[in-house]
């Protein structure tokens, strides 16, 4: 009986020991599983944190690349060939930088009034010292006229077709008045050049009437006259694509009413430089030569959409644009 009892006791102790070992192993396995689960969770949290940081960095980079961040700019557009070209060019450039650019089609007089009232941000074309001198005088206290110029070799004057050999000077016009039906074919009535042309009629005592219309209408009349080999006289300016399409000559202006070489500036509303310092700096750096502006006008006029022509020109002249942007 003692042996049997001892055997039972030993068996019970062994069973208890085995049970204890089993529980110990099970607990160890559970602890290992918990540790692995915690490690996986921590790793997932680290990965998520890194992904968030990378996303934030990408967003910051995108914001740096798109400096405008959706800010809205409103520029005037005047229905002149070179103005349509440069306003579309800057629309493409600035929208690539993250700005939202609106172009408002306005005549020059309304453009300057809107700038003075703060309804426009910029007008990209001011001709000085002669053509837009009246606007400079009227708005110099309410509009910022840039000292910087983007084109330094502009010219304005009356033009006739090359085949009109009898007329080479403004002083010749009265003698051949009937050839032109006593009419100078003009464009937008609010343009500075139109006002200077009125001054020219008075200065030379021309027996002519200046007929206002629009630039496209004036160019159409020039084209029709040349196709019919008729005489026509009109105020024009260079740079302009019309000179690549027709053989025209500027008439001599002995009294220098139109002035000599004109330079093209830009103008902005008060506060623009503080609100958009980066854009203001880019506009001040903007410079173009005859060949560049002539090519841009051609690209824009030849495209189905003006903006498409501007985009194509920019793609082919990115080095020049990068200079303006200080890149």
Image (tube, rainbow, N blue to C red):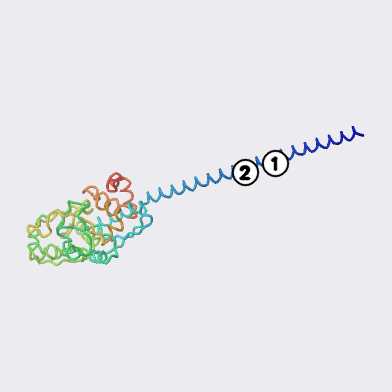
Residue indicated by mark 2: 37
- Farthest residue in the front direction? 2
- SS class of the residue under badge 1? helix
- SS class of the residue under badge 2? helix
Looking at the rendering, in which quadrant would you find the N terminus?
A: top right
Q: Position of residue 163 (x, y in %)?
A: 14, 54
Q: Choose top left, top right, bottom left or bottom right for residue 258.
A: bottom left
User: Can residue 191 be seen from the camera position used here?
Assistant: yes
Foreground residue among 8 and 45: 8
**Does residue 221 lie above or below 1 as drawn?**
below
Q: Position of residue 113 (x, y in %)?
A: 24, 66
Foreground residue among 304 and 139: 139
Residue at position x 37%, y 51% in the image = 66
User: Can residue 232 be seen from the camera position used here?
Assistant: no
Residue at position x 12%, y 57% in the image = 259
Mark 1 Cα shell of 10 Å, populated few (<14), some (14-19), many (≥20): few
Foreground residue among 257 and 134: 134
Which label is found at residue 144?
none
Looking at the rendering, in which quadrant would you find the C terminus?
A: top left
**Does residue 113 lie above or below 289 as drawn?**
below
Residue at position x 50%, y 46% in the image = 51
Q: Position of residue 3 (x, y in %)?
A: 90, 32
Q: Is residue 127 left or right of residue 103?
A: left
Q: CA distance from mark 2 to mark 1?
A: 15 Å
Residue indicated by mark 1: 27
Q: Position of residue 210 (x, y in %)?
A: 16, 66
Q: Is residue 105 left or right of residue 65?
A: left
- Farthest residue in the right direction? 1
Foreground residue among 5 and 81: 5
- Farthest residue in the top direction? 3
């Amino acid at each position: 009986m003692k042996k049997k009892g001892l055997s039972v006791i030993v068996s019970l102790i062994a069973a208890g020991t085995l049970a204890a070992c089993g529980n110990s192993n099970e607990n160890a396995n559970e602890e290992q599983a918990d540790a692995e689960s915690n490690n996986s969770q921590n790793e997932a949290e680290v990965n998520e944190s890194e992904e968030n940081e990378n996303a934030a960095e990408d967003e910051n980079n995108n914001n740096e690349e798109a400096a405008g961040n959706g800010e809205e700019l409103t520029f005037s557009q005047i229905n002149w060939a070179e103005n349509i070209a440069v306003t579309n060019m800057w629309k493409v450039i600035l929208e690539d930088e993250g700005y939202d650019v609106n172009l408002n089609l306005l005549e020059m007089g309304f453009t300057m009034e809107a700038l003075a009232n703060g309804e426009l941000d910029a007008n990209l074309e001011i001709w000085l010292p002669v053509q837009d001198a009246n606007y400079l005088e009227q708005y110099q206290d309410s509009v910022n006229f840039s000292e910087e110029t983007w084109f330094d070799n502009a010219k304005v004057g009356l033009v006739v077709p090359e085949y009109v050999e009898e007329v080479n000077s403004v002083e010749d016009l009265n003698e051949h008045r009937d050839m032109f039906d006593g009419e100078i074919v003009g464009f937008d009535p609010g343009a500075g050049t139109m006002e200077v042309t009125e001054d020219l009629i008075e200065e030379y005592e021309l027996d002519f009437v200046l007929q206002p219309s629009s630039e496209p209408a004036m160019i159409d009349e020039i084209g029709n006259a040349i196709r019919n080999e008729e005489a026509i006289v009109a105020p024009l300016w260079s740079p302009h694509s019309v000179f690549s399409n027709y053989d025209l000559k500027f008439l001599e202006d002995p009294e220098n009413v139109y002035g000599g070489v004109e330079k093209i500036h830009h103008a902005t509303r008060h506060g623009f430089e503080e609100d958009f310092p980066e854009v203001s700096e880019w506009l001040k750096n903007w410079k173009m030569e005859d060949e560049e502006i002539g090519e841009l006008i051609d690209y824009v006029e030849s495209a189905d959409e003006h903006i498409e022509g501007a985009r194509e020109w920019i793609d082919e002249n990115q080095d020049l644009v990068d200079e303006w942007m200080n890149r």
